[in-house]
Amino acid sequence: MYWEKEIETMGRSDLASLQLDRLNHSLEQARRSPFYGKRFAYKAPSHLAGLGDLTTLPFTTKDDLRNAFPYGFLTVDLKEVVRLHSSSGTTGNPTVVFHTAGDIGQWGNLIARCMYTTGVRKHDVFQNMMGYGLFTGGLGFHYGAEKLGVMTIPIGPGNSKRQIWFLQNLETTVVHILPSYALRLYKFFEELAIDPREDLALRIAFVGAEPHSEEIRKKIEDLYNIKVYNSYGLSEMCGPGVAFECECQEGLHIWEDHFYPEIVDPASEEVLPEGEPGELVLTTLTREAMPLVRYRTRDLTRFLPGNCPCGRTHRRIDRITGRSDDMLIINGVNIFPIQIEKTLMAIPEIGHNYLIEIRKENFMDRLQVHVEINEEVFHGTLAELEKLQENAVAALRAELGVTPSVKLVEPSSLPVSEGKAQRVYDYRNEAEAEG
Ligand code: ADP
Ligand code: ZN
């Protein structure tokens, strides 16, 4: 059940001393980069006496990475670097991340650990539907799956009919897929009159790379009759493999032998007490080419209390509820898009996709949600549609504290992208510019 039993179940005090050793080593390594060399020239203590002392060091931000582009964070000679990856640029210019052969090896091992945890074994067939290339989702899992020894189909995203052909004919048992794509792919099964619950050997999906609610997970599990595990990571740390759900599916274990996590208040920047929600800050403990110290991920979560029944001692974080810069302020009320998603997806008549638009009208913010309905309601009566719309508005008002307008649309009619889903369109600044 464990890929590396000793490390995964290590007692907390042993884990803490391993972390402290690795942290001091990592700080020394970081200082070799132009960026940290300058930053820590006077300020940083040469050796931290305890993990708590890390909080005396400043944060590293995405802007720091951008400003130091391209080589400001590199700690090794270019001849030691074997790979470059880049963040997908969801929120601005991309940032580049370098890897030594050692980094690639560690990363693959972490992915193998994640996959093994959920019961994937050598005899499985793994179809990797994440993008190959600069994005870390494809190659990251690819190398990990090979390390585990699983036959890997490097199919990448899109071309849904071909995906289904492989799923059926190779009897794929495990996939790695964007949650938004898993929902979208279902439509192609319907078109082909194939029942994924009955006609596939599939038993596991790893989903990640974009925020998604527990309701979306349940939906995917039901549609395909499989187990869906949440996979979290970001290019700056390596990519996927930073935190992962175990077989208990109650939160994601952060692999603390490689990453030191903190949760901070994004506004005051204070470290928050255990259990309180805030922004995840990560320090790499083993990265060679590009160690990062107190990196502000902007991802919002909290530590889950208690021990996991699986026996792993690495702390768990809750599902990511969004990014600190995702928050929408609608007429003074703070809203995260994920609140809209989980409310909608809890309504059975709602389909698989939605889109959020915000406009300024008469100096007020107007929130409009476009929602796909399911096939049954689409072919139902007008009265049923009106009722559904009223229910959706009422449920959203109760969750959000503001009243959106809801537009019900045909199944599979909203725009989709091959990469991470873009579901929020905020036109307020454009309106101001026009006015
Ligand atoms: P970008 O920031 O450009 O999207 P990455 O491709 O490195 O760059 O994506 C990492 C980000 O994707 C994370 O910081 C997080 O916001 C999001 N993400 C990754 N995995 C998950 C997950 N399981 N749940 C929610 N969000 C996730
Ligand atoms: Zn566990």
Image (spheres, rainbow, N blue to C red):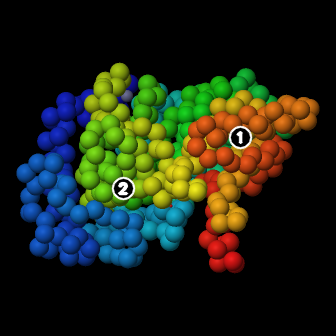
| Res. 45 image quadrant | bottom left
For label 1, the SS is helix
Q: Is mark 1 within 8 Å of ligand 1?
A: no
Task: Residue 384: give x, y in percent of width and height.
Answer: 86, 31
Which residue in the structure is indicated by mark 1?
393
Name the residue at 26% across, 69% down. 75
Name the residue at 81% across, 49% down. 413
**Residue type pointed to by label 2:** Pro
Which quadrant, please, contains the N terminus?
A: top left
Q: What numbered label is drawn on residue 241? A: none
Q: In front here: 389 or 33?
A: 389
**Residue type pointed to by label 1:** Val
For label 2, the SS is loop
Name the residue at 11% across, 48% down. 50
Name the residue at 61% across, 37% down. 398
Task: Residue 249: give x, y in percent of width and height.
Answer: 46, 28
Q: Choose mark 2 or mark 1, whichever is in front.
A: 1
- Is residue 254 positioned above or below 419 on the image? above
Q: Is residue 317 left or right of residue 205?
A: left
Q: Check the image and name the residue furthest to the front.
A: 362
The answer to whether residue 1 is visible is yes
Task: Residue 68: give x, y in percent of width and height.
Answer: 35, 76
Q: Earlier in the sequence, mark 2 or mark 1?
A: 2
Q: Residues within 10 Å of mark 2 (few under 14, many from 20)?
A: some
Q: In front here: 179 or 306?
A: 306
Could you give the CA–CA distance between mark 2 and mark 1, rounded to whole angstroms? 31 Å
Which residue in the structure is indicated by mark 2?
266
Count of numbered circles on the image: 2
